[in-house]
Amino acid sequence: SQQGEEDPQALSIQEGENATMNCSYKTSINNLQWYRQNSGRGLVHLILIRSNEREKHSGRLRVTLDTSKKSSSLLITASRAADTASYFCATDNTDKLIFGTGTRLQVFP
Amino acid sequence: GAVVSQHPSWVICKSGTSVKIECRSLDFQATTMFWYRQFPKQSLMLMATSNEGSKATYEQGVEKDKFLINHASLTLSTLTVTSAHPEDSSFYICSASRPENSPLHFGNGTRLTVT
């Protein structure tokens, strides 16, 4: 399967704590993207990191990419209850996006 | 606001009937749209790539005669689930990219329930 894998599958934290999600993939990539999905809804793009980049920030989000290990991480700092959602990494190598297995994040107030 | 509109948001149909799902790019032309399927608590699985003016490209294991894709214009792609069965019940999501850059913009999905 081309699909990447994420861990943990599920993560529960308290508001204010940081949440870290990891993504591993199998093929070479042009870029790696992270998306968020609220239950029963479409996906919202969070951040894109290109294959020649190692780290990127956007607000409370920090993404790292290690192409030698074929892995990426998403860190959400100072989490809020509204961050509760599923988070997916997606790799782009042949002009189509392949999604990872996802992490279900629950943030308790 | 939404840049990709998907309709309907949910549909219930009887086994054996066909269901059409529409995906529209609202303020840009999309030569390529993608159709994904998502089962409960699972990830999105790419079904096919819809190309304007040509045949869709299906992923391995996806039956092209069952999931008919038509991309007749630069702003509309349709997915028709033919002779639907209960195992086709799923969440179907379309996406489109603006020609000049990533990322993809997603519709809000269609929940199909086949009884």
Image (cartoon, coloured by chain):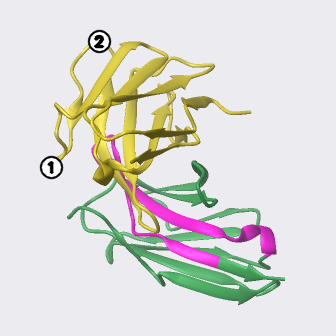
Chain colours: A green, B yellow
Picture coordinates of residue A103, whole percent (x, y): 51, 74
Disc number for residue A7:
none
**Numbered disc 1: secondary structure:** loop
Q: Where is mark 1, residue-wise? A: B61
Q: Is residue B88 above or below residue B11?
A: below
Reply yes or no: does residue A82 show up in magenta.
yes
Q: Amino acid at mark 2?
A: Gly
Residue segment shown in magenta:
A80-105
Picture coordinates of residue A14, whole percent (x, y): 77, 88
Q: Is residue B65 above or below residue A24?
A: above
Q: In the picture provided, is B4 more to the left or to the right than A66? A: right
> Callout 1: few (<14), some (14-19), or many (20+) C-alpha neighbours within 10 Å?
few
- Nearer to us in this view, B29 or A39: A39
In the image, are marks 2 and 1 on the same chain? Answer: yes
- Nearer to us in this view, A13 or A56: A13
- Nearer to us in this view, A27 or B84: B84
